[in-house]
Image (cartoon, rainbow, N blue to C red):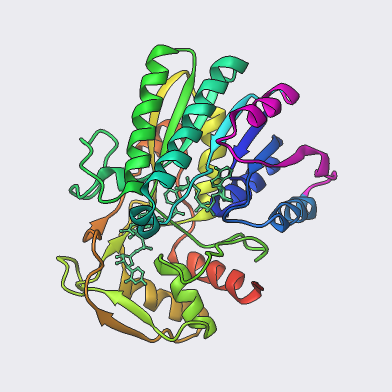
Amino acid sequence: MNILVTGGAGYIGSHTCVALLEAGHTVIIADNLCNSKAETIDKIKEIVNQTSNENIDNQITFYKIDVTNEEAMGAIFTNHKIDGVIHFAGLKAVGESVEKPLEYYYNNIVSTMFLAKACGKYGVKKFVFSSSATVYGDNTVPFVETMKLLPTTNPYGETKAMSERILTDVVKANPDLSVALLRYFNPVGAHTSGLIGEAPNGVPNNLMPYVTQVAKGKLKQLRVFGNDYPTEDGTGVRDYIHVVDLADGHVVALDKLESGLHIYNLGTGKGTSVLQLVKAFEEANGIEVPYEIVDRRSGDIASCYADASKANDELGWIAKRGIVEMCRDAWRFEKNYKE
Ligand code: NAD
Ligand code: UD1
């Protein structure tokens, strides 16, 4: 299939492009590079060419383009017969979304609306959307797809909840379309080549990139946000999922999607606390990660992990990689990474 991957130069998008190309699909990437680099496209090619019998360079096309530019995006749909869209492009920094709400609502929602509209106009039948466990709000773990969603705590989270609602209504009006809302838990790790991975701008907000930068000596020590949560060791519990498993989930979703709306949690179903992750990282890589306990971060919840059984039952997808692989692969990428 010819798959339009918006945000394909980004962290999850680049790993998904590798998985799509390895599965024999052709990818058309649309990314404005606001949070990624053009070199990533070459790295995607390099990874796939290492294992493929034939050169895949002509199976990947890159457009530096803003997904909210409806006219320019229309040209992509005219130039390529698109069979499916995976919509990763979006702004994702929670704190920044509080400071710049309009930028977040515009970028993340208008892009979703334009792409859904283009699917109707150009006869595209499959749409996969990057949602987030953040839409569950402070629910009781494990989070199940059938749960009533609770309020999110920031504009970023709202853009995901709203995009889900928009796409739900679009499917109701167009029953031939298949839409998958994939709710990611906490993606971490990197491709085993060490060529692509997570390289946030500035000081990382998320735990794993913070840990890898402390390990590298770029940051002095980790600040653990609270140790008084009602969890095993008092620190926050999350469902970390290897980004390569997550990428595979998109390929399976595209292959198996029937028409209608389908919501899947993509997580491991296992919760890991901050201190457990730090320990796993130290053991996996033989490096000490100094930390101090500080106050809770506002907007954080105690525990967030998936009931991941629906994706397994319906798609046959399961996360295969454990926390040690996640820590090892995240570190390999960070070690090799040059700004
Ligand atoms: P990322 O920032 O690495 O990738 C997003 C890509 O989209 C970047 O390459 C960026 O340049 C591009 N982009 C942003 N706005 C654009 C626009 N208007 N036009 C064209 N390109 C644009 O982020 P990621 O971690 O790979 O996340 C991908 C998607 O998954 C996002 O929608 C994010 O909200 C969602 N998500 C991420 C996480 C996570 O922890 N990483 C968790 C849940 C959901
Ligand atoms: C955060 C966002 C969420 C978003 C997700 C992916 C918030 C409140 N939530 O999720 O909306 O979908 O990232 O981008 O920002 N931690 C530390 N020290 C750190 C960093 C994190 O102790 O320096 C702790 C956190 O308190 C949490 C855990 O590590 O318990 C994971 O944090 P993080 O990686 O930021 O992910 P989430 O908070 O789950």
Residue depicted at x 64% and y 60%: 196
Q: Position of residue 165 (x, y in %)?
A: 34, 29
Is 51 displayed left or right of 256 in the figure? right
Is 37 displayed left or right of 111 in the figure? right
- Residue 124 figure quarter: top right
- Residue 208 figure quarter: bottom left
Residue depicted at x 17% and y 68%: 229
Q: Position of residue 64 (x, y in %)?
A: 69, 44
Residue depicted at x 72% and y 51%: 41
Q: Give the quadrant of ligand 2.
A: bottom left
Residue 16 visible in the displayed image: yes
Image quadrant containing the C terminus: bottom right
Does the stretch in magenta take in 126? no
Does the stretch in magenta take in 60? yes
Image quadrant containing the N terminus: top right
In the image, which residues are magenta?
A: 52-80
Tally of marks? 0
Question: Looking at the image, which is closer to me, 261 or 223?
Answer: 223
Q: Position of residue 76 (x, y in %)?
A: 69, 29
* Placement of 241 over or under 314, stated as above or below: below
Q: Position of residue 220 (x, y in %)?
A: 44, 86
Residue depicted at x 60% and y 72%: 332
* Placement of 71 over or under 328, stated as above or below: above
* Placement of 68 over or under 157, stated as above or below: above
Residue 23 visible in the displayed image: no
